[in-house]
Amino acid sequence: MSSMRRNEFMDWADQYLRGELSVDDRFAFEKFCLDYPEFHQIFEEHKRFISSWKENERRGLFKKSLHRESLHHQAPAKNDTAIIKIWKKLQMNAGVAAAVALISVFSTLWLTGYFTSIKKASSDYSALRREMNTVKKNVNEQNKAIQNINNGKDKIPTPIHFGATGFMLTKDGYVVTNYHVVNGADSVHLQNNKGQAFKAQIIYSDIEKDIAILHISDSTFKAAKSVPYTFKRQISDIGEDIFTIGFPRDEAVYGQGYLSSKTGYAGDTIAYQISIPVNPGNSGGPVLDNQGNIIGIISGKQKGIDGAAFAIKTKELIETLNRIPADSLKGNVVLNTKNTLSNLTRTEQIKKIQDYIYIVKVY
């Protein structure tokens, strides 16, 4: 909710208000609103808007009904009685009152930023879907745990967690992933392709851009000599060949495709639309061009459209890094400026970057 996301939230909220959700889904929605006050506020504003709209609609129907009755009983104009004259005056006042009510409703919505929130919803699409799935998954896991306790089984439940992807920014342990991946985490661990796991701390979060900066705080971590890729600050071109490596499962998976739009969902300017098959575990993974430059960070996919995914532009990542307060850092964040992947085959590129991409495990 952290700046689909809101657009799909509005659909979910409408289903809740219309009573179309199952008991479990209603519980998931209510829990989600409690966990994310910013979306609870949007939900309350949406309810007020719907209520005001329905009230005005009822006034309009009542007005039409009165108008039909007046036409049915209306005498010739030249013989208008005092009662009919009074009725016409009241009819005019009712119309003015309805117009004033509509203006008041829309003015209130504009002043409270409702329409701004709707516009911003386009950039929040993917993370909300992930949050919704996480809530539902946790609810289901908790229900299973309760059933197992009642049955006398699995007396020590396994901690609930899920995985995603992150990749190294600097040789000394700074890593980037999506904010929605680590939001609400008690602890975060990064596992490399050799199976080694390191504890990480969340250094900084950019909710609007869905970016989280981590730092490996584990004493067993050894800094690399350098990272092999660079970070492209310029906007890439439509049709450019791209690839990614991520962890939709506990093993690195390669994906290949092309850049299909310079903007994300509904024209979101902080993201690209990319044509690469992705799954929830790919969130936070790198998107690279043929020369081995990082051009973006996978943030999610569009429901109902196969192969349509979104990636936050590297330009936005760099702007986020520049905003991190100095006292939050454990040393400077210095991005690599020497690319050692550009002259390699794709197979060799993949071999070289796998050591710098992690499974992000959130507990």
Image: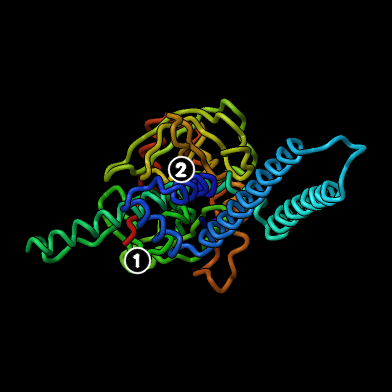
* Position of residue 321 in the picture relative to residue 174 (left or right): right
Residue 149 image point, x, y percent: 12, 64
Q: Secondary structure at mark 2?
A: strand
Q: Amino acid at mark 2?
A: Gly
Give the color scheme: rainbow, by chain, secondary structure or one colour: rainbow
Reading the image, the residue beneath label 1 is: 187
Q: Are marks 2 and 1 in contact (CB under 8 Å)?
A: no
* Position of residue 298 in the picture relative to residue 262 (left or right): left
Question: Would you say residue 194 is visible in this rendering?
Answer: yes
Q: Quadrant of the C terminus?
A: bottom left
For label 1, count other residues whose C-alpha is less than 10 Å away and answer few (under 14), some (14-19) or many (20+): some
Relative height, residue 161 to residue 258 (above, below) = below
Q: CA distance from mark 2 to mark 1?
A: 22 Å
* Position of residue 132 in the picture relative to residue 237 (left or right): left
Residue 60 image point, x, y percent: 69, 45
The answer to which of marks 2 and 1 sits earlier in the sequence is 1
Q: Quadrant of residue 67?
A: top right
Residue 350 image point, x, y percent: 38, 37
Nearest to the observer: residue 291 or residue 309 = 309
Question: Would you say residue 284 is visible in this rendering?
Answer: no
Nearest to the observer: residue 239 or residue 99 = 99
**Residue lying at 68% horizontally and 60% vertically, measured from the top left:** 112
**Residue lying at 49% horizontally and 44% vertically, measured from the top left:** 11
Reading the image, the residue beneath label 2 is: 300
Residue 25 image point, x, y percent: 35, 51
Nearest to the observer: residue 2 or residue 231 = 2
For label 2, count other residues whose C-alpha is less than 10 Å away and answer few (under 14), some (14-19) or many (20+): many
